[in-house]
Image (cartoon, helix red, strand yellow):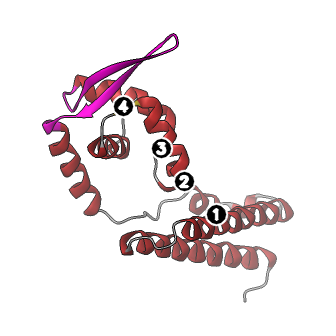
């Protein structure tokens, strides 16, 4: 389980006890899989592992139809682990420079030019959609905290840089060094 998954689950349980389905619903509503490297399918595994490690405990069990749902609560050890994870995450740069695109650009000359240009155009379209989604998110969270605003600003700056890179690659591939 990744440290991001541990941090997310422990952070949500820090707010209040909840069951796995509730955690996955909160993740879906906030579209956290777009902002964090945490997949909703990893939540149940994480809860089981965190419980085995003594970082969460079963507080209650709820019956919903045929299903029995465990309601989990964070333990003191879990709070200490959450604090450690938060401090570790704050000590790292937000984004790395590693990218499969960087590796592919190394051998882009092996591809037919039109196919490569079409893929770059597709990547640009995905970035445009991501920008639109980010701006909608910012509008939906009107009056957000300064911390959240800083994160949205950073996301926009990253999208700007990625757009410039794709445009430059397209220009180089097209023979227009402009």
N-terminal of the pair, mark 2 or mark 4, is 2
Q: Which mark is residue 34?
A: 2
Q: Which mark is residue 46?
A: 4
Q: Residues within 10 Å of mark 4 (few under 14, many from 20)?
A: some
Dominant SS type (magenta): strand
* Residue 97 in view (yes/no): yes
Residue 60 placed where, x, y %?
A: 29, 22
- From the image, state whether disc 1 or disc 4 is nearer to you: 1
Q: Which residue does the image show at 36% across and 31% down from the upper left?
A: 46
Residue 145 placed where, x, y %?
A: 39, 71
- Specify the farthest residue to the bottom: 178
Whether pointer 2 and pointer 1 mark residues with C-beta atoms closer than 8 Å, the reply is yes
N-terminal of the pair, mark 1 or mark 4, is 4
Please give the range of residues in magenta: 53-77
Q: Tell me the CA gap for discs 2 and 4.
A: 19 Å
Q: Left or right: where does residue 118 sit relative to residue 89? A: right
- The residue carrying mark 3 is 26
Q: Residue 177 or 54: which is nearer the viewer?
A: 54
Q: Residues within 10 Å of mark 2 (few under 14, many from 20)?
A: some
Residue 159 placed where, x, y %?
A: 58, 71
Q: Secondary structure at mark 1?
A: helix
Q: Residue 171 or 56: which is nearer the viewer?
A: 56
Numbered disc total? 4
- The residue carrying mark 1 is 133
Whether pointer 3 and pointer 4 mark residues with C-beta atoms closer than 8 Å, the reply is no
- From the image, state whether disc 3 or disc 4 is nearer to you: 3
N-terminal of the pair, mark 1 or mark 3, is 3
Q: Which residue does the image show at 33% across and 24% down from the upper left?
A: 48
Q: Which residue does the image show at 61% across and 60% down from the upper left?
A: 101
Q: Is residue 31 magenta?
A: no
């Amino acid at each position: 389980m990744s440290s991001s998954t541990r941090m997310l689950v422990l952070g949500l349980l820090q707010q209040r006890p909840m069951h796995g389905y509730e955690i996955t619903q909160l993740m879906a509503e906030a579209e956290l899989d777009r902002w964090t490297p945490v997949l909703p399918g990893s939540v149940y595994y994480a809860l089981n592992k965190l419980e085995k490690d003594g970082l969460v405990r079963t507080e209650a069990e709820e019956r919903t139809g045929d299903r029995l749902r465990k309601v989990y609560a964070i333990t003191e050890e879990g709070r200490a682990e959450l604090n450690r994870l938060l401090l570790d995450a704050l000590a790292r740069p937000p984004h790395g420079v590693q990218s499969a695109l960087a590796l592919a650009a190394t051998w882009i000359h092996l591809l037919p030019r039109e196919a490569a240009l079409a893929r770059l155009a597709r990547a640009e379209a995905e970035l445009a959609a991501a920008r639109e989604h980010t701006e909608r998110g910012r509008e939906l969270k009107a009056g957000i905290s300064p911390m959240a605003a800083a994160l949205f600003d950073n996301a926009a700056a990253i999208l700007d840089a990625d757009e410039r890179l794709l445009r430059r690659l397209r220009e180089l591939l097209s023979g227009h060094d402009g």
